[in-house]
Image: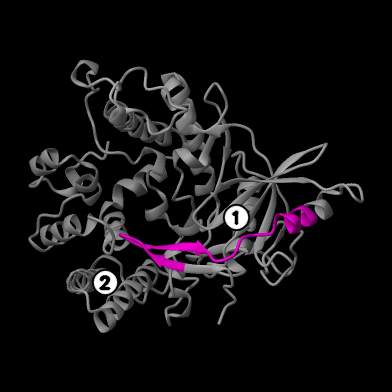
Amino acid sequence: MPNQAGLEWVEEMFDLEPRWTKEPDVNIIASIARTHLGCDEGASPGVSFYAQGAFNKLYMITTPSTICFMSVSLPVDPHYKTESEVATVAFVRQNTSLPVPKTIAFDCNNENKLGFEWTLMEMMPGVPLHKRWRKMSWRAKEELVKRLVKSQARLFEHRFNKIGNIFKSESDETSGAFTLDQIVSIVFFSGDHLIHSVSRGPFTSSHDWLKARLQFVLNDQQRILDTSCDEDELEDAERTLTLAKKLLELLPTIFLPNVSASESTMLFHDDLSMNNILVDENGQLTAVLNWECVSFVPLWRACQFPRLLEERIRKEAPDKAAYASDSDEENASEDPELDNEGMCNLYWEHLEEYEMTRLRTFFLEEMQKVQPEWVAIMRASKLKADFERAVQGCDSGLAPVKIRRWIDCLHNGQPRDLWTMMHSYPEEDEKGQDRMWKEVDLC
């Protein structure tokens, strides 16, 4: 049984969320930082809480000569999550021009003075992209997308032949060599999943990787059916179990089982969102953050739009005259640092959707120039990518409704594009009911 002291999982509306049962000691954090930053004896670095992510707390460390951060991690996947994240950042620094934080020191064993795994890293300049986006010029937005295209094209060139996470090679950790081992991914450690008898890889085929993920869904729903007395919960579990079984039946028709040859994989940051991209005052890229749980996945999964661009489809620019002002309290910006310029939040949401729709087209045009094989794989892999989306969403939120419709269309010989179904407004989705997935324009 892994040591997960300090962690508990709490049931929220749609999912389990991790909680801290004890707080990291800032005095111990200061002591660790002093040791690794070479501070004078008796000089104590300043330590202040800075931010909190899903699985970590970030502390700012200040000394007379430097400012850096310490990320203190919950033991969601003891040892493996921290060790893989450090290796992944090193891999990205070694093989791309993306600006990522340099690791100063780390401890992937939570049986230490702090009682948690930790990583000490350099501070990166810039602010989250969402704070600058509205004021950025269109040219700056295109230049940012170009940087993302180039980085994905570079990662496309550095492949492994299994699905999993990378770690520093134990034989020579100083050489910059990496090895691919078991996967570190939320579905594989959420709740009590660490103790489930489900393979963690590394996987040699898409079939086995997706089957393992579906097995967690089956296990979770069966546990609810066996233990719950809540009628609504039981009804939801029965529906989800039925949906997961349908996907399990579909799996071998889309991904061949028992494939002898391993398939190519590449590193794919599946949460490349505005919060994880830092830019300067001109909108130029200064850092890409949060490389935890970033795995090597099949090319058909990695050759997809970054999360940043995955907004609803909107082909026409919103007309300001059709929107309310933000004078009403209910329309005031949720982020006080954002300037609504007198317009309600809905206008800005729709404008962002329109911009991302245009930028998806631009992304593909640029990728076609830089790495046309990437684009060819994306266009040839729509059904596979849709199936993975169905696996990802079959037990969460409102997605199962559209996934069931998508499966029905497949069975009826009229396959539809699940990505488009999930990113279209209801009226547009209805218009496209009869369109085959191969005919749908993702942009």
**Residue visible at 47% across and 69% down?**
189
Say left or right for 374 vs 399: right
Q: Observer-nearest residue: 64 or 260?
A: 64
* SS state under label 1: helix
Q: Quadrant of the N terminus?
A: bottom right
In the figure, 356 relative to 434: above or below?
above
Give the residue number, with chain letter if any, for mark 2.
Answer: 252
Q: Which mark is residue 438?
A: none
| Horizontal side of residue 361 vs 202, given as left or right | left
Query: From where the camera sits, is residue 127 visible?
Result: yes
- The residue positioned 67% from the left and 40% from the top of the image is 123
Q: What residue is shown with label 1? A: 88
Find residue 439 and report its image quarter: top left
Q: Is residue 275 above or below residue 339?
A: below
Whether the residues at callouts 1 and 2 have beta carbons within 8 Å, the answer is no
Q: What SS does tag 2 mark?
A: helix
For marks 1 and 2 on the same chain, the one whose residue lies earlier in the sequence: 1
Q: CA distance from mark 1 to mark 2?
A: 31 Å
Q: Position of residue 381 (x, y in %)?
A: 31, 53
Q: Position of residue 91 (x, y in %)?
A: 63, 52
Residue at x-position 80% and y-position 41%? 63
Graded by Cα atoms within 10 Å as few (under 14), some (14 to 19) or many (20 or more), the crowding at tag 2 reads some
State whether residue 127 is above or below residue 206: above
Left-right relation of 30 to 408: right
Residue at screen point 44% across, 42% down: 273
- Residue range in magenta is 9-32
Q: Residues within 10 Å of mark 1 (few under 14, many from 20)?
A: many
